[in-house]
Amino acid sequence: MPRLSLVVPAYKVQGYLSECLESVLGQDYADFEIVAVDDCSPDGSGAILDEYAAHDDRIHVIHLTENVGLGRARNIALEKARGDYVLFLDSDDTLSPGALSAIAGRLETAGDPDVLIYDYVRTYWDGEVRPNQRAHLLADADGEVFSLAERPQLLDLLQIVCNKAYRRDFIAREGLSFPPGYYEDALWTYRSLIGAERITVLDRVCLLYRQRREGGNILGTVSRKHFDVFEQYRRVFDFLDTHEDGARWRAPLFRKMTDHYLAVLDRPGRLPQDARAEFFHRAAADYRARLPEGFTRPGGARGKKYALLERDAYAGLAGATAAVKLRNTVRGRARTTLGRSRRSAMNLYYRSQLRLPRDENLAVFSAYWSRSVACNPAAIDAELARLAPHIRRVWAVHPDAVDQVPEGVDHVRVGSREYWSAVARATYLVNNVNFPDSVVKREGQIHVQTHHGTPLKTMGLDQQKYPASTRMDFGRLLERCDRWDFSLVSNRFSGAVWERAYPCSYTSLETGYPRNDVLLNSTAEDVRAARRDLGLGEGTTAFLYLPTHREYRRDFEPRLDLVRLAERLGPDAVLLVRGHDAHPRSGRLAELAADGRILDVTGSPAVERLYLAADCLITDYSSAMFDYANLDRPIVVFADDWDTYSAVRGTYFDVRAQAPGAVATTQEELAEVLCSDAWRDERAARARADFRRRFCDFDDGRAAERAVRHIFLGEPLEALPPLVPLDERTPAPQPGPSREASAPISVPTSQR
């Protein structure tokens, strides 16, 4: 029987769930269990819970077959909890280090009270941490135990369940359970505090209460569900009517009820505009029906709002709100006018185009800051031509990329009048990065963020922890991401990262990466053609070396001595080098290049054709490894500067420990791996299989089709082509040499 049971419900929290669980499992106190409930979450939350449970028997996972909501999910977990005490932890929040030790210690010194209340802080996406403004109410006197009647001011604390520990037999004695609907904490917290005979407090921050920017907290969602608050307070006052001491708590809870109603009205982003008056009148009816005799309204602006409720005077509240809005609008217009006076004539032209009707059949594509026609946008473009030829496709490119635009497809030069007209009037805007800040998201436009890789290195807001790696303005980054309607996901791992790193209100589509379709759909002749284009002979083994950028270096020099490596590999091997200039005008490197043993493929527009041609990928920390793994071909990781790279840029996992194949940390080790069987032996194959199970979830060859059918043709998700299981997929055939018996590459005797 554990001392503590932590109840963790999970619904659409894949971006935060691991951090939540790690904050518990990393505690210095071990006498606990986690009862986690997968509330039929449509994302990867359930799989994450199972993965953790497989490695720690203190985690018990309950999978629900239908979504029941937060309150009912907690009730189901309570039936399975075995601890002396129950703590509720929302799956996007975390515990502070040492929290469980402090909680357990206070419970012991206080002689097992009914309820323990501990402190919390609010944490925000930009790193801000706001302390509890009423933390002084938790000042304790050496574990003093008391009832609410002795400290009624505790009702002024934020009434949530996640900052308290409840004795499990007390929960059973009081018959506590959570009602359905929004604001389910109200009834539980008031009933438990009033019913508790012995309460204690802990003046220590134990809970990090995440304030999600967008799309996470249901209480920040515009919905009529906020009307649930009336039913919750009906339950609260019904409880007071039946409780022997209920009369003394009527006035304090009337004040809490009124403040709660006003908070819903005051906060934007909760009630639909056409529901505000109805909500106010419902609140006014409750106010007048439950107004305690002799109740004194508070002073100041808050007291004036109480008076408006008492008179049911919605016009007064609406007028006050409108006045504030008008002041803000006037200030905003002044700033806008000043900004417009500084805009160029081209920006004014763009504004004029925004006033024209949208073209329902116009799609604008861009990739890599308009430097190329490639990646996921190019794959979607091609599939759009097949499935929806009525949609006009236009590529936004810089002049040096015009020759990459497919024949028969229009293009506009970035910055031209045609460019601004296209981005203003298009219905669809598709990019693997963000469009410039100056691009306005107009009503009815659909922005598709395809991304361009699975992240090993930190991205978005996660980079805030590694300031040496970026000078990004994170506020403006999120403003750009606010334009997204869809975010394409290639695997559950990256889907969780995107939702945490870019916390905006887009829809994640688990389609797979369209650019990787070719890796599943290509034929043996396609592979031969890709190799012929590079001049690779029939018996040649091609190693594709594809390193990534280092933020701690200004230049982009190769970390390998290409001459030494090529000479070790011998004449039957070719190094395909992408990422820097490998063709000097003189020297041994130039000779090897002339002989075709080192090929600079940096300028190849389609990296996917290089993947098809290569027998093996050599990389360090590039996202290329995740794409190439779809081919089920050997991958070698060259991690010679891992400690520096991971410290400067930050990474999501240690690629050395979870590599897709053999790992080398020095050039000599790499040469030994490539000149032996280690790059393609059974051990490497097992590592690759594990890697593919984790990172090749959705890339089954039909990603572009799914994206086009759902986004452009409006087909529902359930009607899209079903995902082909990993074990049933057939990648593009391997080049000839890789099919041969795994014999080591021939190395000249003089080089052994």
Image (cartoon, grey):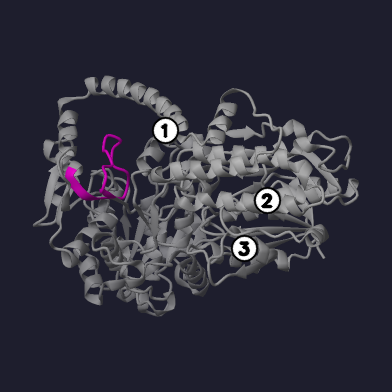
Say what secondary structure mark 1 lies in.
loop
**Which residue in the protein does label 3 denote?**
73
Q: Earlier in the sequence, mark 1 or mark 2?
A: 2
Camera-side residue: 729 or 629? 729
Q: What amino acid does circle 1 point to? A: Asp
Residue at (41% x, 59% y) in the render: 625
| Residue 333 coordinates in the image, percent (x, y) | 30, 24
**Which residue in the protein does label 2 denote?**
236
Q: Which mark is residue 473?
A: 1
Q: CA distance from mark 1 to mark 3?
A: 39 Å
> Which residues make up the magenta segment?
425-446
Q: CA distance from mark 3 to mark 2?
A: 21 Å
Can residue 460 be seen in the rendering of this structure? no
Say what secondary structure mark 2 lies in.
helix
Camera-side residue: 331 or 173? 173
Residue at (20% x, 69% y) in the render: 529
| Relative to 171, 533 lies left or right | left
- Closest to the camera, between mark 1 and mark 3, is 3
| Relative to 752, 509 lies left or right | left
Q: What amino acid does circle 3 point to? A: Ala
Q: Which mark is residue 88?
A: none
